[in-house]
Amino acid sequence: MRLIGAIHPPEAIRAILDCLALPSRAPPPAPPVPDPEPWPVDFDASP
């Protein structure tokens, strides 16, 4: 892929995306994922 140009003003980017019916805002952050349960330890570590 080759970069052929850059659009700097945020208003121009927003107008282009809105014209193409694409979201012009970032999606909301996803909720945090809980930590998985630790694996049970079923061995005897005594010497």
Image: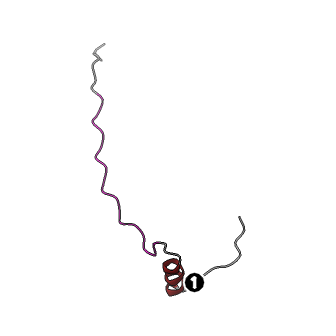
Whether 38 is drawn above or below 18: the answer is above
Left or right, 15 with respect to 46, comes to right
Residue 16 image position (x, y, % from top left) = 54, 81
Residue 47 image position (x, y, % from top left) = 31, 13
Label 1 Cα crowd, 10 Å radius (few <14 / some 14-19 / many 20+): few
Nearest the camera: 44 or 39?
39
Looking at the picture, the colour scheme in use is secondary structure
* Badge 1 amino acid: His
Whether 34 is drawn above or below 9: the answer is above
Q: Which residue is mark 1?
A: 8
Q: Quadrant of residue 45?
A: top left
Name the quadrant of the N terminus. bottom right
Whether 43 is drawn above or below 27: the answer is above
Whether 40 is drawn above or below 36: the answer is above
Left or right, 46 with respect to 11, comes to left
Residue 28 image position (x, y, % from top left) = 35, 66
Q: Is residue 3 magenta?
A: no
Identify the magenta region. Answer: 23-39
Q: Who's the residue at 29% across and 17% down the image?
A: 43
Nearest the camera: 26 or 32?
26
Secondary element type, mark 1: loop
Q: Main secondary structure of the magenta part?
A: loop
Q: Who's the residue at 31% across and 49% down the image?
A: 33
Q: Who's the residue at 53% across and 76% down the image?
A: 20
Left or right, 1 with respect to 34, comes to right
Residue 40 image position (x, y, % from top left) = 27, 26
Left or right, 29 with respect to 5, comes to left
